[in-house]
Image (cartoon, rainbow, N blue to C red):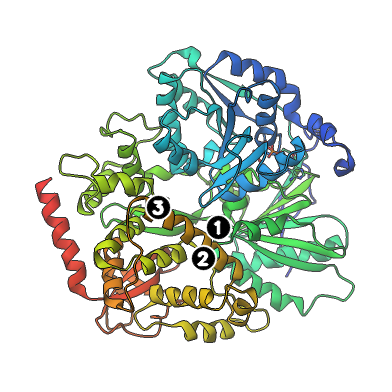
C-alpha cells in the first residue's frame, strides 16, 4: 500500500515535502471559527480590495474579477454591494453558479454572515426549488440555468441591479448563453452592472468579448491578490492503473498517519459508479482498521442526490471520526466544506459530449484541465493549510489543457436553441456567442425542433414551442407532456417525467450490497421496461401513504421519492397552465409507451443477438446498464427507447422501455419529410 508521492520544487521524486506555497499564504490565526463573523470577513484577502472593487463597479459596466480560490469572491462581493446600496429600492443582487450545491451552500453561508434566515434577505433558486422571498430577498444565489430561464419571463431582468456570473471559467452552456444575453441587455439597460468572476479565468478573452463592438470603457479587469491558506501539492511518481482503489488507499493512509487530529478528506472521482466502487473499497478496508484508529466516515456527494442529502456533507463529523467525502466535480468550485484539509484528485472528469452526426448525447471520462485541478486543490486551504494529492505524475499535469472546452461546443443544443428562439433571437448567426456552437449541432437541433413541431417551417417558434421553452425540463420530456393530451395518459406521463428527473431511487442497504435492492426492485418490475417500473414505484409510494418506513422496507430512498412528488407537483402546474389534461391511461401501457416514443424519438435502439443494442442513429453498439429491468432479458419486439446514455469503458444506456419499431418509424418519416421541406 505504499504509494509514492513527491512535490514539485523538491530535488526529485521521493524527497521530503517542500512547501511550494509557503510565504505567500495569508496569515490567519488557527482559531478562526471562534472569531466573530465580522472579524473573519475582514481577514479574507478580498477585503483589502473592497474599495477598489466598489469603485470599478461604479465606473464600468462590466468587471472581470480574478482572484485565488478561497479569497472571498463568492461570499463577500455580493455583501459589499449590498452594504453600499446596490440592493436598495427593491433591487436584487444575483450571483450565478454552474452547480446546485454551490448555490445552496454558499447562500446558507452568506445568510449566516448577514444574520438572515436563509430565504429571507439572502436566498437561492435552483431548478424545482426556490428558497427566496420575492419582496425581501436582496442577495440571490442561483444556478446560471435558472437566471437564463428568467429572461424568458423578464427579458431585461429588471429586478436585478447587478449580476455576478461566478465560476465563469467552467464555461457551462448557460454561463455562455447568459453572457451573450447580458451583453445584449446592457445595450438596452446600461444601468445593469455585470461581474464575471473566477480563480482560473482567461480574463483578457472575456474583456475582449465585452469590449468588442462596444467601447473600451465598457469593461475592466480587477485582479485580487493573496490567498487564504497554503495548499501543498503532491503527485504520484507513477501513473496508477486503478485510480478508485488508489484514492481509497491514499485516504486510508492519511487517516492512519494523521491520528485523531488534523482535518477531513475530500476526494474527487468521476461519477456515481466510481463513488460506489470506492465505498466498497472502504467497506473492505474497514475490517482492517486498528481499534485505536480514528473512524472513517465515507459520504457520497454527486448531482443525483437531493439538496438535503448534498448538504449532509457539510455537517461536522462526530468526535473521534474523520469525514471522507467522495465527490464528483460538483464540489469543485465555490464550495467551502469546513474542516477539509486533504484533497485527493483522481485527475479525470466525466464530460457531456454530443455527437452532432448521430445526434446522440453521452458522457465520456476524460482527463481534467489545469483550471479544474487548481479548483479542486483550492477546496483545501480554506479554513486551514492543506495538502492536495494528485493521483497522476507531474509530467501528466504538464500535458493537461489549460481549461475545459466550453460546454456549448460539445452539447446538444436543442433545448438552448428553443429557449433562444423564445427570447426572440431568431437569427442565431447574429447572436454574440462567447464561443459559437458547431454549425452541425445547431443544424441538428433545428432539425429536431422542426421534427418535433416546435419550430415551424418559417423558422419561428410554434405555439407549442413557446410553451415547451418555458417548461423546466428537457425538450424531449416536455414533448411527452404535450403528446399525452392526444394519447390520454397525462397522469402517468407526469409521474414518469418526475421520476426520470431524480436519480438514486433504489438504495443499496448497508450490509446487503445489491441483493436486497435487486429483490425489492423486482417487486415493482413492469415487463415493458424501466419507465413503467418507475411508475409502479411511485404509485405504490403514494398508495402506502408516502411513508419513510415503507420506503426503508422496500430499499427505496424516501428523500428521492419525496423530491419526485414535489417535482411532479410543479410540472402539474405547467400542465394546467397549458391546458393539458392529466387523465389516466387506465392501464393501457401501449398508449403510454407511444407517448414515451414521442419524447425519445431520437433515442431508439435495436437488440442484436449478442445481447447488446445498436442505436437507430449512428448504428452504435450500446450496452444495457445493469440497473435496468431489461438487463437480462431480450425485449419481445427487439426494440427499445432509452432515457440516457453514458460512456464509460463501454457505452451504456439507462432507463429503457420496449417499443414497437413502427412507432419510431412514424417519427422518422415525419422527421424526414419536414426536413426535406424546410
Ligand atoms: N461555510 C463556510 N464555513 C467556514 N468558512 C467559510 C465558509 N464559506 C466560506 N468560508 C470562508 O470564506 C472564504 C471565502 O470563500 P469564497 O467562497 O467567498 O471564496 P472564493 O474566492 O469565491 O473561492 P472560489 O474561487 O474557490 O469559489 C473561504 O476561504 C473560507 O475561509
Marks 1/2 in contact by CB < 8 Å: the verdict is yes
Q: Quadrant of ligand 1?
A: top right
Nearest the camera: 183 or 307? 307
Disc marking residue 503: 2
Q: Quadrant of the N terminus?
A: bottom right
* Residue bearing mark 3: 574
Front position among marks 3 and 2: 3
Among numbered discs 1 and 2, the one appearing first in the sequence: 1
**Callout 1 crowding tier (Cα within 10 Å): few <14, some 14–19, many ≥20:** some
Give how far across and how far down residue 636 sits, in percent.
27, 85
Answer yes or no: is residue 644 visible: yes
The alpha-carbon separation of the residues under discs 1 and 2 comes to: 9 Å
State the residue at coordinates (35%, 46%).
469
Front position among marks 3 and 1: 3
Q: Is residue 650 left or right of residue 672?
A: right
Disc marking residue 303: 1
Answer yes or no: is residue 266 visible: no
Amino acid at each position: 500500500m505504499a504509494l509514492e508521492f513527491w512535490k514539485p520544487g523538491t530535488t526529485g521524486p521521493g524527497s521530503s515535502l517542500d512547501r511550494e506555497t509557503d510565504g505567500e499564504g495569508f496569515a490567519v490565526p488557527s482559531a478562526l471559527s471562534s472569531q466573530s463573523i465580522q472579524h473573519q470577513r475582514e481577514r479574507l484577502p478580498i477585503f483589502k480590495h473592497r474599495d477598489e472593487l466598489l469603485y470599478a463597479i461604479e465606473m464600468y459596466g462590466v468587471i472581470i474579477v480574478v482572484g485565488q480560490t478561497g479569497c472571498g469572491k463568492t461570499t463577500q462581493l455580493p455583501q459589499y454591494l449590498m452594504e453600499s446600496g446596490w440592493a436598495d429600492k427593491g433591487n436584487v443582487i444575483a450571483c450565478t453558479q454552474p452547480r446546485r450545491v454551490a448555490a445552496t451552500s454558499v447562500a446558507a453561508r452568506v445568510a449566516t454572515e448577514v444574520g438572515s434566515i436563509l430565504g429571507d434577505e439572502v436566498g437561492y433558486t435552483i431548478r424545482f426549488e426556490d428558497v427566496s422571498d420575492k419582496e425581501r430577498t436582496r442577495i440571490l444565489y442561483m444556478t446560471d440555468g435558472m437566471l437564463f430561464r428568467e429572461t424568458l419571463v423578464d427579458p431585461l431582468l429588471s429586478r436585478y441591479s447587478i449580476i455576478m456570473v461566478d465560476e465563469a471559467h467552467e464555461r457551462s452552456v448557460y454561463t455562455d448563453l447568459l453572457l451573450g444575453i447580458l451583453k445584449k441587455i446592457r445595450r438596452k439597460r446600461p444601468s445593469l452592472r455585470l461581474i464575471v468572476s473566477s480563480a482560473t479565468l482567461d480574463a483578457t478573452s472575456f474583456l475582449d468579448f465585452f469590449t468588442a463592438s462596444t467601447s473600451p470603457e465598457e469593461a475592466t479587469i480587477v485582479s485580487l491578490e493573496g490567498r487564504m491558506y497554503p495548499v501543498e501539492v503532491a503527485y504520484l511518481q507513477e501513473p496508477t492503473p486503478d485510480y478508485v482503489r488508489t484514492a481509497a488507499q491514499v485516504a486510508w493512509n492519511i487517516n492512519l498517519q494523521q491520528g485523531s487530529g488534523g482535518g477531513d478528506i475530500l476526494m474527487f472521482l468521476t461519477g456515481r459508479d466510481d463513488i460506489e466502487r470506492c465505498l466498497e473499497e472502504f467497506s473492505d478496508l474497514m475490517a482492517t482498521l486498528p481499534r485505536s484508529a480514528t473512524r472513517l466516515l465515507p459520504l457520497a456527494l454527486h448531482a443525483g442526490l437531493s439538496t438535503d442529502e448534498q448538504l449532509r456533507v457539510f455537517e461536522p463529523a462526530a468526535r473521534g471520526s474523520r469525514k471522507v467525502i467522495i465527490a464528483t466535480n460538483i464540489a469543485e468550485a465555490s464550495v467551502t466544506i469546513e474542516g477539509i484539509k486533504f484533497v485527493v484528485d483522481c485527475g479525470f472528469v466525466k464530460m457531456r459530449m454530443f455527437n452532432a452526426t448521430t445526434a446522440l448525447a453521452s458522457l465520456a471520462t476524460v482527463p481534467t484541465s489545469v483550471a479544474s485541478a487548481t479548483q479542486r486543490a483550492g477546496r483545501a486551504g480554506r479554513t486551514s493549510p492543506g495538502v492536495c494529492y494528485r493521483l497522476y505524475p507531474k509530467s501528466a499535469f504538464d500535458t493537461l489543457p489549460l481549461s475545459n472546452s466550453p460546454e456549448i461546443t460539445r452539447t446538444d443544443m436543442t433545448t438552448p436553441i428553443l429557449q433562444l428562439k423564445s427570447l426572440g433571437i431568431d437569427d442565431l448567426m447574429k447572436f454574440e456567442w462567447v464561443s459559437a456552437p458547431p454549425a452541425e449541432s445547431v443544424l441538428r437541433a433545428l432539425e429536431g425542433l422542426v421534427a418535433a413541431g416546435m419550430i415551424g417551417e418559417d423558422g419561428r417558434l410554434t405555439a407549442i414551442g413557446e410553451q415547451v421553452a418555458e417548461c423546466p425540463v428537457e425538450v424531449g420530456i416536455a414533448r411527452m407532456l404535450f403528446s399525452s393530451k392526444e394519447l390520454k395518459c397525462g397522469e402517468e406521463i407526469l409521474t414518469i417525467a418526475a421520476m426520470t428527473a431524480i436519480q438514486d431511487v433504489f438504495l443499496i442497504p448497508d450490509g446487503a450490497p445489491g441483493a436486497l435492492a435487486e429483490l425489492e426492485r423486482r417487486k415493482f418490475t413492469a415487463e415493458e421496461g424501466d419507465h413503467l417500473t418507475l411508475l409502479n414505484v411511485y404509485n405504490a409510494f403514494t398508495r402506502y401513504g408516502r411513508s419513510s418506513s415503507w420506503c426503508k422496507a422496500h430499499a427505496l430512498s424516501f428523500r428521492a421519492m419525496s423530491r419526485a412528488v414535489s417535482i411532479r407537483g410543479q410540472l402539474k402546474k405547467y400542465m394546467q397552465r397549458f391546458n393539458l389534461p392529466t387523465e389516466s391511461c387506465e392501464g393501457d401501457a401501449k398508449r403510454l409507451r407511444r407517448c414515451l416514443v414521442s419524447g425519445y424519438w431520437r433515442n431508439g435502439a435495436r437488440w442484436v443477438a449478442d445481447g447488446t443494442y445498436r442505436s437507430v442513429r449512428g448504428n452504435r453498439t450500446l450496452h444495457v446498464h445493469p440497473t435496468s429491468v431489461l438487463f437480462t432479458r431480450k425485449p419481445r419486439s427487439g426494440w427499445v427507447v432509452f432515457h440516457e446514455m453514458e460512456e464509460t469503458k463501454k457505452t451504456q444506456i439507462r432507463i429503457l422501455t420496449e417499443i414497437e419499431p413502427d412507432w419510431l418509424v412514424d417519427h422518422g418519416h415525419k422527421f424526414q419529410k419536414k426536413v426535406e421541406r424546410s
